[in-house]
Image (cartoon, grey):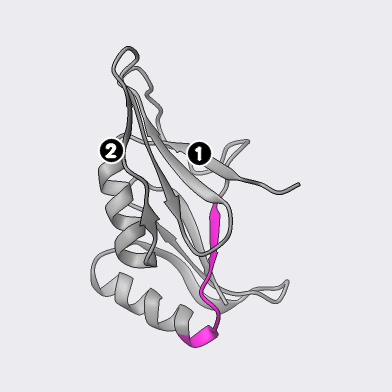
């Protein structure tokens, strides 16, 4: 068994697709549309791990919360501490919010935490 994909509801899946493709060299599937429900989605692939499905529907609304039960973050392993430093600096210089790091965590990870355009937390790890 393995996790095949995880999904996020989004206000604008095209903006999120462009963010993940642009910053993480991800591949995006063609858009899927269900005309009857207004549902649309893209699958995002980063490397060989589980895919991320970005979904939207006109009747789905949510106010982002800093902390709530359920989804907490996505972690993307960049391979080296230097890669974390470089990508964090590049993202910061382009206005991507950096919440913390780069730093070594108490459990041994080297990481920074950034936000995607819709406020989803992403850990950049080595």
The picture places residue 126, in percent across and down from the top left corner, at 57, 77
Which residue is situated farthest in the right direction here?
Answer: 1
* 115 drawn magenta: no
Secondary structure beneath dot 1 equals: strand
The structure residue drawn at horizontal position 38% and vertical position 57%, both measured from the top left corner, is: 27
Q: Residues within 10 Å of mark 2 (few under 14, many from 20)?
A: some
Image quarter for residue 63?
Answer: top left
Name the side, left or right, on which 11 lies relative to 71.
left
Name the side, left or right, on which 69 lies relative to 19.
right
The picture places residue 102, in percent across and down from the top left corner, at 49, 77
Q: Which mark is residue 7?
A: 1
Secondary structure beneath dot 2 equals: loop
Image quarter for residue 23?
Answer: bottom left
Foreground residue among 7 and 91: 7
Can you identify the residue that label 2 sits on? Answer: 12
The picture places residue 69, in percent across and down from the top left corner, at 63, 36
Among numbered discs 1 and 2, the one appearing first in the sequence? 1
Instruction: Please say if the residues under marks 1 and 2 sit with CB atoms less than 8 Å apart.
Output: no
Q: Residues within 10 Å of mark 1 (few under 14, many from 20)?
A: some
Q: Which mark is residue 64?
A: none
The structure residue drawn at horizontal position 26% and vertical position 43%, both measured from the top left corner, is: 14
The structure residue drawn at horizontal position 31% and vertical position 56%, both measured from the top left corner, is: 19
Name the side, left or right, on which 60 lies relative to 49.
left
For the magenta stretch, what is the residue range? Answer: 73-82
Which residue is situated farthest in the bottom direction here?
Answer: 82
* 75 drawn magenta: yes
Cα distance between the residues tagged 1 and 2: 14 Å
């Amino acid at each position: 068994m393995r996790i095949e994909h995880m999904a996020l509801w989004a206000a604008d899946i095209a903006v999120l697709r462009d963010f993940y493709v642009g910053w993480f060299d991800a591949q995006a599937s063609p858009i899927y549309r269900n005309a009857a429900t207004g549902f649309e989605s893209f699958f995002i692939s980063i490397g060989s791990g589980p895919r991320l499905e970005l979904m939207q529907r006109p009747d789905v609304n949510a106010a982002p919360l800093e902390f709530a039960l359920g989804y907490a973050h996505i972690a993307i392993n960049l391979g080296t501490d230097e890669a974390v430093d470089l990508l964090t600096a590049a993202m910061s210089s382009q206005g991507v919010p950096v919440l913390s790091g780069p730093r070594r965590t108490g459990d041994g990870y080297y990481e920074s935490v950034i936000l995607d355009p819709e406020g989803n937390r992403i850990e950049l790890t080595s």
